[in-house]
Amino acid sequence: MILQAVFDASLANATTTITAAIAALAAGNTATSTPDATVQAYMAAMDAKIVALAAATPPPGTGSTLAIVTQPTSGPVALGAPFTLTVVATGNSPTYQWSLNGLVIASPSATTATLSVASAALTDAGSYTVTVTDPSGFVTSTPVVVTVA
């Protein structure tokens, strides 16, 4: 859609310029470039715009680049207190999987961007990571250590 808009705008601009060049030639103004030269110049400019835009635009359906934008952080948690860990990621419909000490956590909130623990137990202490996945691959957060006291 973006490429079509660039193409349409460039084509409209080329048509206007070509029409003006033809009118100038018809009026006897030979200082104006020829219609062929004008068409070639605008086609080259349009090709360059399309190539640059295509290089900067992800392929259709891939969305943005998979990356963790904000790493999860934590501090000490009181025994019995609730705590959450949150990650912010970009990607094409990313999915999440939290782990504690290298083991996948089996909890509904362990597959969302925010891991929620309602009441911290001593067994909740440890090193947490989250793996974010999309069709282009996966990325794992830096470990965050949660202490429970």
Image (cartoon, rainbow, N blue to C red):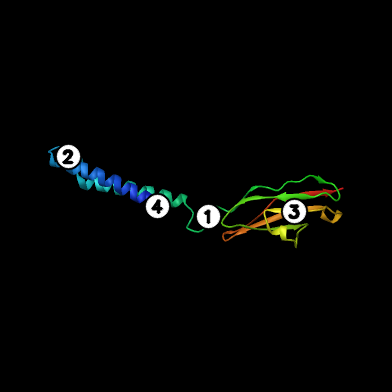
Type of residue at label 3? Ser
Question: How many residues crowd mark 2 within 10 Å: few (<14), some (14–19), many (20+)?
Answer: some
Type of residue at label 1? Gly
Q: Secondary structure at mark 1?
A: loop
Type of residue at label 2? Ala
Q: Secondary structure at mark 3?
A: strand
- Along the polypeptide, which appears first: circle 1 or circle 2? 2
> Which disc number belongs to residue 63?
1
* Marks 2 and 3 in Cβ contact (< 8 Å): no
- Along the polypeptide, which appears first: circle 3 or circle 4? 4
Q: Is residue 85 above or below residue 107?
A: above
Q: Which label sits in the foreground, 3 or 4?
A: 3
Q: Is residue 32 above or below residue 77?
A: above
> Which disc number belongs to residue 116?
3
Q: Secondary structure at mark 2?
A: helix
In the drawing, does residue 34 fall left or right of residue 115?
A: left
Q: Disc 2 to disc 3, how far (Cα)?
A: 72 Å
Question: How many residues crowd mark 1 within 10 Å: few (<14), some (14–19), many (20+)?
Answer: some
Type of residue at label 4? Leu
* Marks 1 and 4 in Cβ contact (< 8 Å): no
Residue plotted at (72% across, 57% down): 109
Question: How many residues crowd mark 4 within 10 Å: few (<14), some (14–19), many (20+)?
Answer: some
Image location (x, y in percent) of residue 89? 62, 51
Residue plotted at (68% across, 47% down): 71
Give the residue number, with chain letter if any, for mark 2. Answer: 24
Q: Which label sits in the foreground, 2 or 3?
A: 3
Q: Which label sits in the foreground, 3 or 1?
A: 3
Give the residue number, with chain letter if any, for mark 4. Answer: 3
Image location (x, y in percent) of residue 138? 62, 58
Q: Quadrant of the N terminus?
A: bottom left
* Marks 3 and 4 in Cβ contact (< 8 Å): no
- Along the polypeptide, which appears first: circle 2 or circle 4? 4
